[in-house]
Image (cartoon, helix red, strand yellow):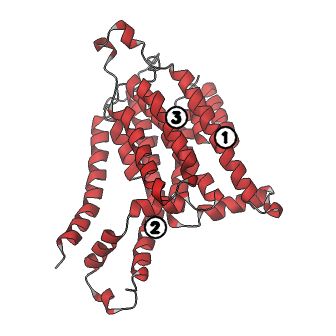
């Protein structure tokens, strides 16, 4: 019979999937049912594909963590393996912090590992948080915090695609409402979150956990504390906040500078005789597949890039503008990062 702590550990594992399912249903049920633009379902398809790809590798990480734990406590090859499987799983959960284990593997690897991971972290802390808040307030989309929480618990690409779908369904034919002004809370938290991401490789055992916790709190703060509807404000208060385009540019150039630093660091960490294009590509791919947690996060970033490219074209409207936005996205991604590219597209 399992002990109370073991039962609690198994219950926490089950509750994870319950919460993920609840968040998904909450989001889908809150999205407007009327179809305003054709083809929005492409983002549901991309969300499903992102989940399959990233969680294929995440399941490999979970299996690796379980086997690593049993090997560490010298259970493999002993009679303890004959215990009920759920008892062994409970012991593993009680003695392993999966979240911290995954984050340490992806944050403290090689310079090329961080090159992959920083792109996704900067997108989440910068571009996506801004996009969620500004577009969510612009189209009065409900439960913005749920998209972020689902992205953090599952994958960012799943949350991003569901939000793209929500925005597409909320848009009306004709002129869209002007972009909402950036709330002062968002203007304060986003640069700080991005700074924490940038400094992560230099944290240690004593500072890594608190920094990670603070970053996640900062991500949710502007999504939970939303401004009141304009009709409920005094006219002077309606103008409060920062110009959306100006703030987009600030986040965009912060992202570009931070990613340029990571790219330079990764480049200089490569052996001089391997700094040709083929050698750099090999180093990047070796880092991508160096650990299952790294692979899952890396592919999450790739799926985000693909999804943002589809959004850039989809939201372009007519063919000429769509092609222009698509081309700008490709160039922006090659020069800087996915965050730079997606924010650049929102400045039109």
- Residue at 49%, 40% (x, y): give it: 193
Instruction: Quote the CA–CA distance across marks 1 and 2.
Output: 29 Å
Give how far across and how far down residue 95 sits, in percent.
34, 71
Residue matched to label 1: 336
- Residue at 47%, 53% (x, y): give it: 207
Which of the two residues, 32 or 243, is positioned nearer the viewer here? 243
The mark nearer the N terminus, 3 or 2, is 2
Which of the two residues, 190 or 84, is positioned nearer the viewer here? 190
Q: Quadrant of residue 166?
A: top left
Which mark is in front, 1 or 3? Answer: 3
Secondary element at tag 1: loop
Q: Residues within 10 Å of mark 2 (few under 14, many from 20)?
A: many
Q: Quadrant of the N terminus?
A: bottom left
Which mark is in front, 3 or 2? Answer: 3
Q: Quadrant of the C terminus?
A: top right
Q: Is residue 11 shown to the viewer in this render? A: yes
Secondary element at tag 2: helix
Residue matched to label 2: 61
Is 281 placed left or right of 90 in the picture?
right
Is 256 placed left or right of 83 in the picture?
right
Residue matched to label 3: 191
Instruction: Quote the CA–CA distance across marks 3 and 2.
Output: 31 Å
Q: Is residue 317 shown to the viewer in this render? A: no
């Amino acid at each position: 019979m399992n002990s109370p702590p073991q039962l609690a550990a198994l219950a926490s594992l089950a509750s994870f999937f319950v919460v993920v399912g609840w968040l998904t249903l909450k989001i889908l049920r809150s999205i407007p049912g009327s179809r305003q633009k054709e083809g929005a379902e492409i983002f549901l398809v991309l969300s499903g594909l992102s989940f399959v790809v990233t969680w294929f590798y995440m399941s490999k990480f979970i299996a690796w963590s379980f086997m690593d734990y049993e090997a560490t406590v010298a259970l493999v090859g002993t009679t303890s393996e004959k215990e009920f499987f759920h008892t062994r799983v409970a012991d593993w959960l009680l003695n392993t912090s999966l979240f911290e284990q995954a984050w340490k593997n992806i944050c403290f690897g090689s310079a090329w590992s961080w090159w992959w991971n920083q792109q996704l972290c900067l997108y989440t802390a910068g571009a996506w948080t801004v996009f969620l808040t500004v577009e969510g307030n612009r189209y009065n989309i409900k439960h913005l915090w749920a998209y972020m929480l689902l992205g953090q618990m599952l994958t960012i690409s799943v949350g991003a695609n569901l939000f793209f779908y929500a925005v597409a369904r909320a848009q009306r034919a004709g002129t869209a409402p002007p972009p909402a002004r950036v709330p002062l809370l968002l203007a304060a938290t986003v640069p700080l979150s991005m700074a924490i991401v940038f400094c992560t490789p230099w944290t240690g055992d004593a500072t890594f956990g608190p920094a990670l916790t603070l970053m996640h709190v900062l991500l949710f703060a502007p999504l939970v504390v939303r401004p009141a509807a304009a009709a409920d404000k005094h006219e002077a208060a309606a103008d409060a906040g920062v110009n959306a385009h100006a703030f987009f540019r600030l986040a965009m150039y912060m992202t570009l500078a931070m990613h340029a630093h990571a790219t330079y660091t990764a480049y200089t960490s490569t052996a001089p005789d391997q700094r040709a294009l083929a050698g750099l590509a090999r180093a990047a791919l070796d880092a991508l597949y160096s650990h299952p947690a790294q692979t899952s996060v890396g592919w999450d970033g790739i799926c985000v890039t693909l999804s943002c490219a589809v959004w850039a074209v989809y939201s372009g409207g007519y063919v000429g503008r769509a092609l222009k936005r698509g081309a700008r996205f490709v160039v922006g991604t090659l020069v800087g990062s996915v965050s730079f590219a997606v924010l650049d597209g929102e400045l039109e």
